[in-house]
């Protein structure tokens, strides 16, 4: 079983990276309660990991893929 299978399209990876960067900027620039900051940074980390690796574990569990390659599994 392959651990990291690309199941995201390039466009989706770019959107996830942009949203992740925006969440990091929000967490750093706003003076929010510490738990909200941790939540924003955790979400940003997950989105950036997905953008870099091209793998979404939720998509994998559901058997969904936006990757243009038809047989990515």
Image (cartoon, helix red, strand yellow):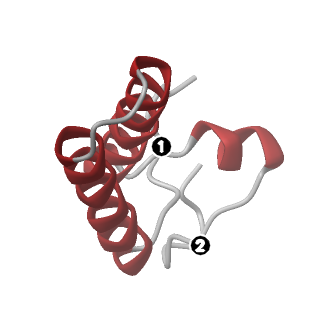
Q: Which mark is residue 5?
A: 1
Where does the N terminus fall, quadrant-wise?
top right
Q: Circle 1: is it few (<14), some (14-19), or many (20+) Cα within 10 Å?
A: some
The answer to which of 68 and 14 lies nearer the viewer is 14
Left/right placement of residue 13 relative to residue 5 reads left
Identify the element where label 1 is drawn. Answer: loop
Q: Which mark is residue 70?
A: 2
Identify the element where label 2 is drawn. Answer: loop
Give the mark count.
Answer: 2
Residue 34 drawn at (x, y percent): 39, 19
Q: What residue is drawn where x is 25% and y is 45%? A: 24
The answer to which of 69 and 58 lies nearer the viewer is 58
Residue 47 drawn at (x, y percent): 40, 47
Ranked by sequence position, the earlier of labels 1 and 2 is 1
Where is residue 66, by image quadrant?
bottom right
Tell me whether circle 1 and circle 2 mark residues in contact (CB < 8 Å): no
Where is residue 41, by image quadrant?
top left
Q: What residue is drawn where x is 59% and y is 72%? A: 70
Q: Nearer the viewer's eye, disc 1 or disc 2? A: 1
The vertical placement of 4 against 56, above or below, is above
Residue 30 drawn at (x, y percent): 27, 45
Q: Which mark is residue 53?
A: none
The answer to which of 21 and 1 lies nearer the viewer is 21
Q: Circle 2: is it few (<14), some (14-19), or many (20+) Cα within 10 Å?
A: few
Which residue in the rendered view is the most extreme toward the right?
62
Residue 16 drawn at (x, y percent): 39, 62
How far apart marks 1 and 2 lie (CA) works out to 12 Å
């Amino acid at each position: 079983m392959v651990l990291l299978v690309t199941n995201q399209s390039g466009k989706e990876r770019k959107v996830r990276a942009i949203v992740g960067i925006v969440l990091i900027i929000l967490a750093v620039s706003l003076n929010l309660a510490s738990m909200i900051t941790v939540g924003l940074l955790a979400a940003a980390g997950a989105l950036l990991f997905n953008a870099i690796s091209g793998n979404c574990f939720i998509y994998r569990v559901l058997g969904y893929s936006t990757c243009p390659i038809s047989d990515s599994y």
